[in-house]
Amino acid sequence: MICGLLVKFCNFIVHYVDHTMKELRPNAKRGRIAVGVIWVIILLGIVSLIIEGIQLLIASEIISVEDIGGNLLFILDSVLSYTTSLIFVATIASIVTFILWFRRAYYNIGLKTGKMRYGDGWAAGAWFIPILNLFVPYRIMKELYEKTDQYLVVNSREPYTERLKTDYVNGWWTLWIIRFFTSYISFKIEWGPLSTSDGNPFFSVLDSIIGITLGIVTIIVIEDYSKAERLLVETEDNAIDQ
């Protein structure tokens, strides 16, 4: 009798662990954190863009240093220096928080639909592998959108009216590629063999504009997918209730 109870207990534990491992993992909080960090970068980027714009106007001789004032110009340069440092720190945080959200989202839809093109580890690792990071993350995000859309069309218990479309994904990745190269050029101008004593305000302004736009589009992508992901959670809850 004791052996029978032990067997039943072991079966219960195995069944419980297996069921828990296959449940969707919470991702809404990760999405909110990722969006919050990106907003910080956007706000800091706007501050940088304003100061870089003033520097561009001075370099283009549209306004003179006398018009700004030496003391104010010094303050603006100091603010830009601090802002650049804060953007760097926030960007590192954004990379971490976005990848955590991205990998969890890919993992969850993999549980629902079965075999995916890549393992969920690729949703994190692909960003750091040269050459592959130019197209694999895009493929993963596109598959994330397509598989989720296909699943919800068939299985959603709630009205699925705002269907996922890859238009946002295409725009997001196009901006990411452009930003990748503008940041590289801007870095070379500031610190590399192309550097000059005054840098190049035009590329700094261009890089900031693209960075701010990319941040906004990335927020749109995260929030757009998060709406659909909530429906995935609801289908999970309904399945458990049944």
Image (cartoon, grey):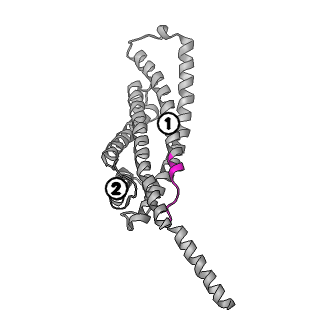
* Residue located at (55% from left, 76% from top): 15
For residue 178, what is the image quadrant?
top left
Tell me the residue that label 2 is attached to: 149
- Is 25 a magenta residue? yes
Residue 104 in the image: above or below residue 64: below
**46 and 15: which is toward the camera:** 15
Query: Is the N terminus in the top left, top right, bottom left or bottom right quadrant?
Result: bottom right
**Residue furthest front as drawn:** 242
Residue 110 in the image: above or below residue 132: below
Indicate the secondary structure of the residue bearing disc 2. Answer: helix
Q: Where does the image place residue 157, in percent across and percent down from the top left? A: 40, 58
What segment carries the magenta color?
A: 23-31
Q: Where does the image place residue 131, in percent across and percent down from the top left? A: 36, 53
Q: Earlier in the sequence, mark 2 or mark 1?
A: 1
**197 and 134: which is toward the camera:** 134
Whether residue 188 is visible, yes or no, is no
Tell me the residue that label 1 is attached to: 39
Specify the amino acid type for callout 2.
Answer: Asp
